[in-house]
Image (cartoon, grey):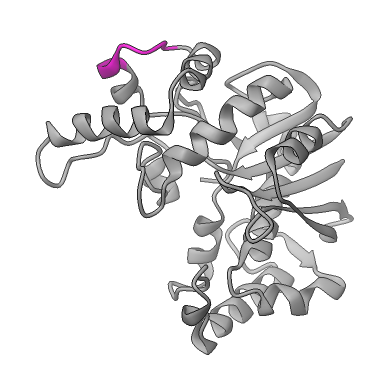
Amino acid sequence: MKLHGVDFTSTPSRRKGITIASGQMQADVLRLESLQTLSDFTAFDSWLMQAGPWLAGFDLPFSLPRELVEHLHWPSNWPDLMRHLQTQTRAELRLQFKAFCDARAVGNKFAHRATDIPAGSSPSMKWVNPPVAYMLHAGAPRLLDAGVSIPGMYEGDPQRIALEAYPGMVARSITKASYKSDDKSKQTPERQQARELIVTALEAGTTPWKIKLDLGRYKTGLIADGSADLLDAVLCMLLAAWAWQRREDNYGLPEFDALEGWIVGA
C-alpha cells in the first residue's frame, strides 16, 4: 500500500506549496520514498485522482463543528455541507463565523469538534492564526470532488482513502518547543534543534504511535527546512501508516460524528 502525508496550504504557490511525503511499510519500518511540492490546485486535483491503492493523511480539517453548522442552518450531512461551502467565498465565511463568535462569551468564542480536544487542534472554524477554516474551504470539497473514500464520513473509491491528520499532535508528543516558522527571520537554531529531536524520535519509533521511520537521504533536508513543511508531511505520513496497520479496525478511528469527522490517531 502506498502511504502519503500531505501538508496542505489554502494558497499554494511556488514560494509555499502543498507538500507530499510518500512511502511504504517494509516489515515494521515506514520507509520515506519521495517528497514533492505542488504549487497550484490544478496539480493537487490531478494528484488526488491518481490510481490507487493508496492511503493518505491530510493536514487540513475535513469538516466543521456540528454546533456551528446547526446554528447557521447549514446542511447536516457531510457531502451537502461541502457543496454548500463551495457556494461561499472566504469573506462570506469570515463574516458568518465572526458573527457567531461575537455573540458568545469571552473564553468560549469558537465552537469545537469533539476531536479537537484529544488532538489539541485549532477549531476548524478559525480564520486567523492559523486560518484553518480557509484550509477546510479550499481542501475538503476537493476530496469530495475527487471521489476518495473517507472512513466513517463518505464512501467513495475504496482504493483511494483519505484521513484527516494533524502533524502538530505528533510533534508535541516529542517536544513542546516550537519547531517551525514561515518567517525566515524566525527560523532559529533552537527551532532546528527541535526538528532534530523530532527526527531522532521518528527514526527510533519513540512516539505514541510506535512506528520507526527510515528517512534515508531525506533526513538532512527535513532538519534543514525551517518552515517544516517537509517534516509536517512526514508526520502526516506516519499517521497514515498507523491507520493502515489498523485497517481491519476502521483505521483505528473511534465512533465519531460523521458530520464533524475525526483526526486519525487522536
Q: Is residue 16 visible?
A: yes
The residue that appears at 83% across and 61% down in the rendered structure is: 32
Q: Where is residue 234 in the image (x, y as percent from the top left)?
A: 70, 59
Q: Is residue 50 left or right of residue 189?
A: right
Q: Position of residue 38 (x, y in %)?
A: 74, 50
The residue that appears at 62% across and 18% down in the rendered structure is: 154
| Quarter in which the N terminus is drawn | top right
The residue sitting at the bottom extreme is 189
Q: Where is residue 35 in the image (x, y as percent from the top left)?
A: 80, 59
- Does 167 appear in magenta? no
Measured along the vertical axis of the image, is residue 190 above or below residue 81? below
The residue that appears at 40% across and 38% down in the rendered structure is: 124
Q: Closer to the camera, 103 or 169?
A: 103
What is the number of callouts on the image? 0
Measured along the vertical axis of the image, is residue 113 above or below residue 265? above
Q: Is residue 262 visible?
A: no
- Does 73 appear in magenta? yes
Picture quadrant of residue 53 = top right
Picture quadrant of residue 214 = bottom right
The magenta stretch spans which residues? 70-76
The residue that appears at 61% across and 67% down in the rendered structure is: 228
Q: Where is residue 202 in the image (x, y as percent from the top left)?
A: 68, 68
Q: Closer to the camera, 1 or 60?
A: 60
Q: Is residue 14 left or right of residue 65?
A: right
Q: Is residue 27 left or right of residue 36?
A: right
